[in-house]
Image (tube, rainbow, N blue to C red):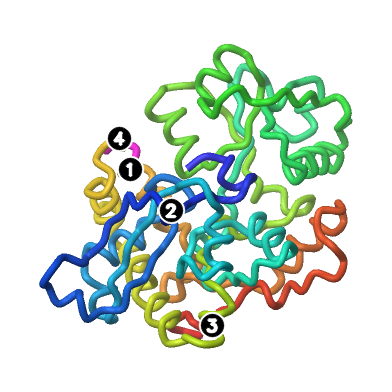
Amino acid sequence: MTVPTRLLVAVASLAVLSACSTAQAGDPSQDRRPVSVILDWTPNTNHSGLYIAQERGYFSDAGLDVTIVQPGDTSGLQLLAAGQADFAYSVAEGLVPAREKGADVVSVAAVIQHNTSSLISLTSAGISRPRDLAGHSYGSYGSELEEALIRTLVSCDGGDPDAVTMPPLASDDFRIGLTEHQFDAAWVFDGWDTIRLRDLDGLDVSTMPFLDHTDCIPDWYTPLVATSQEHIDHDPALVRDFVGALTRGYEDAITDPQAAADAIKEAAPEIDEDLLSRSARWLAPRYTDDPEHWGVQQAQVWDDFVGFLQDNELAPSTFDTDAAWTNDFLPAG
């Protein structure tokens, strides 16, 4: 789970089915409805509810035969819009431009209630607040949203955004980038990257959580689960059944983080077990503000995020924010 997936729109393809399907020849799954779910990145704890629901048979109980598709070469949102997939993990900053370009895709659940992004730096760099970035370098993915966020953070804190250099990232190995001074700060996700750098790699790092600066920048949903308007209009029962089973999985991830780690480890044994366990424990209380209502999205969060995009000329003033999301398919909806 790294920042490029948030900035460049999650990529996936049904052509590379590195899949976890319950279907086998001759078993009862033949009678279940096939459903494809495209990930936004390789398996990680953002996906824990999906893997728990698969492992514990929640999708099967709902009459669904779910195939989990790992990343490929085509945007998951594009595949949704083309009718070649049923659900996709994505991000608000991917869904907005996708809709703008004609992809009729809709967010049906927020995976994590609040943005868990941070700017990370070595403590020795002395970057403790946004204005401290002036005179330092920020490792950039080249995203317009990324530049708008950094400039806004720095200027809002009284710093000079023009004094921040933004060299391109040579790779997403933040440990090498920080320790070899390729950049002084980078955008990471605390539930994965910060845990790995601080707790596993032993680096002395400091972070500036985006959520601490919502007086300057918006909160937003990253990641989220999306489906097509076609499914919403013509097969709402499928959407409701899938989201209901997925909700059960995330409720389990909240109450039993180790089960979340174990489910992902089973699907992707190459992932460091310690990282999975630490990440699952960290995320458990953050999936939702209310453990009984996972996935709920707020109009104000969407309005503020799209407003920020519009203020920075990254979305048209005519963008229909209300059409981009719904809570209607959540069990409490």
Q: Which of marks 2 and 4 is nearer the N terminus?
A: 2
Q: Name the residue under label 2.
A: 46
Q: Distance between the residues labelled 3 and 2?
A: 24 Å
Q: Distance between the residues labelled 4 and 1?
A: 6 Å
Give the numbered dot on residue 67.
none
Give the numbered dot on residue 232.
3
Q: Which of marks 3 and 2 is nearer the N terminus?
A: 2
- Look at discs 1 and 3 and give the one toward the viewer: 3
Q: Estimate how packed mark 1 is, as few (under 14), some (14 to 19) or many (20 or more) residues with alpha carbons within 10 Å.
A: many
**Residue 61 sits in which quadrant?**
bottom left
What residue sits 46% from the left and 84% below the top?
A: 332
Q: What is the three-letter code of the residue carrying label 1?
A: Leu
Give the numbered dot on residue 276.
1
Q: Earlier in the sequence, mark 4 or mark 3?
A: 3
Give the numbered dot on residue 272.
4
Q: Do the residues labelled 4 and 1 touch (CB within 8 Å)?
A: yes
Whole-percent x, y for residue 86 in the image: 45, 70
Q: Estimate how packed mark 4 is, as few (under 14), some (14 to 19) or many (20 or more) residues with alpha carbons within 10 Å.
A: few
Q: What is the three-letter code of the residue carrying label 4?
A: Asp
The residue range painted magenta reads 272-276
As helix, strand or loop, the secondary structure at mark 3 comes to helix
Q: How far apart are marks 2 and 1 (CA)?
A: 11 Å
As helix, strand or loop, the secondary structure at mark 4 comes to loop
Whole-percent x, y for residue 140 in the image: 69, 31
Q: Distance between the residues labelled 1 and 3?
A: 34 Å
